[in-house]
Every structure is written in C-alpha cells, then in structure tokens.
Image (spheres, grey):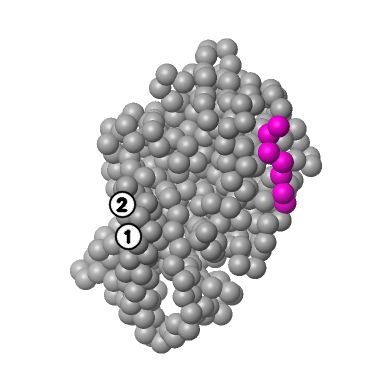
Amino acid sequence: MQNKVWLEKNKIKHIYPYLSTDISCDIVVIGGGISGAITSYILANEGHDVVVLDKNIIGYKNTANCSGCITDFTDELYVQINKDELKFKIIKDLKSKATDTLKQILSKVKGMCNNSNYLILDTRLFRKKYLKNEILLRKSQYEECDFLPNEEVFNVNNIVEIQKGAYNLNPYLFTQNILDYLSRNFNVRVFENTDVKFIEATLENVNIYTQNNFRITAKNVIITTPIETIDFVTENPNIELVKRYSLVCNNAFKENLYAKVLSDNPFYIRNDKEKVIISGYDTKCTAKMNSKKYAQNINQENKEKFENILLKIFPKYNITQSDIYSSNILKTKDGLPIISELSYFPNVYVNLGSGGNGIMQSIVGANMLKDVVRGYYPKEMSLFDLKRN
C-alpha cells in the first residue's frame, strides 16, 4: 500500500462502522474525503438527515495525498474567463460566497489552517505582459497583488504575489474533524468500508445497495469522488481522469509558501514547517497503470523530474529526502468543476472539482446543491453541467 502524505505523523483519528442494516435518510453523500466532508457540512447545516459513505477509510485516499491548499476558484483561467463578462461575474460571486463558507467552517471546525500569500512564479520568457493583465484584473476585483522584485531564493523570470490568496491545511485532519463535528452536533451518520455496488433511482427516491446487500433509501444522492462516477463523466470527451503526481521533500524555508509555477507543464509548490509538496505532471489514467512495473517506472521518472525542477527554481535548496505520491483527479477542458445531475438517474448528483482547485470548487458545488435538494435549480449550474461542451 502506498504511503500517505498526511498520515506520516497523523494516524487514523476516528474509526467509523460499516453499514450493517437497511436505513433511510434525506441525503447520501458518497465519498468520505475532503469534498464529501465539506458537502456534508453544508447540507447538515440546512437541517438535512445526511449519511456519508466511503468504501475505504475516511479521508484515506486522494485526500491523504493532496497538497491541502485552497486557492482561487478560477486560478489560471482568470483572464480567459474575463472575456465572457457574464460568466466572470457569476464565477466571481460564487467564489466570494465559497470563501465566506470556508471561513464559517473554519470558525466551527479545527482546521489547523493558515491563510498565506499566493505566489505566481513564471519561468517562461516574454510573458510579463500577460501577468500584467492578470494583476490589473485582480486589482479591479479588490484583490491586493503585484509584481515582486526577483530574489536570490527564486530562479524565475517573474514573481507575482497575491495577498492572502491561499489557505493551507492538513486535509486529512480537516476531513476527520469536520465529520467528527457533524456526527456529534448534527443528524449525520458516517460509514466507512462500505462500498456502493448499485444505485436504483426514481423520481420518488433513490435506493443504494452496498457490497453486503444492505439498502439505503434516500431522497437525494450526491457523489463527490471521481472513481465512483468514472463511467458517467468520461462519456464527455472534454473530461478525463488523470493521475496527479506529488513529490514530498524536506522543508525548504521557515515561512509558509504556496506557489503556482508557470512553465510548459504548470505545477504547484507548497512549503510549510515540515515539508515541501510539489504537484503536477498529470498523466491520463490508462490500463497500463495497473502494471506494477509501469507504475514504478513512471514514479521514478517523475521523482527525478520534480527534483530537477526544485533545484532549478531554488538553486540554494538542498534536498536531503524525498518521496513520490499520486492521486486520481478529474480534469475538464475548461478547468471548471462538474456540478450536475446524472442522466437517467433522477435525484443523483455529482460534485466534482477539476484539477488543483478541487477543494474550493467542491464548496461552490455544495452551495448550489443545497438549493437543488430544496427544489430550486440555480441557473448558473448550467456552466458546470456534465454535458457542457
């Protein structure tokens, strides 16, 4: 079993039972990672009876291997989206609402979170004018950002600093703490090691059958994990499941740092008091990845690539230890999430982030879906529909 980035010093905090009887509820959330936990929080606060299911251990799969950074909802699409004024306004409002929701969650749940500046490190030549456009656009939205003078610590062409543009947390502990808070204070039941084998959906209700043939009857189902929806979402050629690789190294600097590195293959770097995490090199998932030898080879190749990148960008950095990790994520052509009802499955929805913005995007999705389960379908959901072009 692959090691987990966030479980090296944080062992399993809570053990939840597996489902062992037939039950009913208002809403089932499938996926006990950080997106499922956030979705459950928002729905439970609306007064719904929520059941959370995970076929593994809560927070143990992709969540335990992600960078744990919450950043811009739009990120690298900021300038591109602005070309469509209506879409930009909608997404700006959704982003603002999601940030307020995150702050509310952090006020109630121990997140071990710090709000840090967000750097854009550009390794490319002759791209400064594009960054100027992004800075002007962000300033028009009252974001504090500007170019920084190049420092000896960074070997890049341009540096942009966005004030308080990122939230850094331990995603595994945050997930565990959210679900612990919900199970103690709300009508939320959590079951792990409970695999969903079959979903039967009608206009009246949804029946979920588990691997042990127990049944959950719910009014609505929300799926927050890409693996459980792969057969549905990959019907759209603009969506693909990829494996994202992350190198974890010894700490580089005393201060917290989160940066997007612009290069031929953009990637992200997070530094905190314990470790550096560099994530990128997304590779489309194929049958070849089931081969242990193939997986080992690609892991080693990416490990070497990441180490070379770190030494190039941070010439004074001394890598004393490093290890490679991977997780599965969805990527969409437009970089926006999938927040949608599934075809032929009434009352079954997906709330799936895209790429490196999955956590913030899952908050956006949950805020919309809390309206959907009340019978109100927000018109802006069409931007995130599974069947969009």
Q: Residue at x 74, y 46 (%)?
A: 181
195 within the magenta span? no
Q: Residue at x 42, y 48 (%)?
A: 329
Q: Position of residue 204 (x, y in %)?
A: 57, 12
Q: Examine the rendered structure and indicate whether residue 212 appears above or below residue 324.
A: above
Q: Which residues are magenta?
A: 14-20
Q: Examine the rendered structure and indicate whether residue 276 appears above or below residue 18.
A: below
Using the rendered view, name the quadrant where residue 124 is placed. Answer: bottom left
Q: How far separated are the C-alphas under marks 1 and 2?
A: 7 Å
Which corner quadrant holds the C terminus? top left
Q: What residue type is disc 2 on? A: Lys
Q: Which residue is mark 2?
A: 288
16 within the magenta span? yes
Between 107 and 303, the one lying in front of the other is 303
> Would residue 282 appear left or right of 16 to someone viewing this image?
left
Between 335 and 187, the one lying in front of the other is 187
Q: Residue at x 62, y 48 (%)?
A: 57
Q: Examine the rendered structure and indicate whether residue 154 appears above or below residue 211.
A: below
Q: Which residue is mark 1?
A: 294
> Would residue 178 appear left or right of 65 to someone viewing this image?
right
* Disc 1 element: helix
Q: Position of residue 287 (x, y in %)?
A: 32, 47
Q: Position of residue 138 (x, y in %)?
A: 40, 55
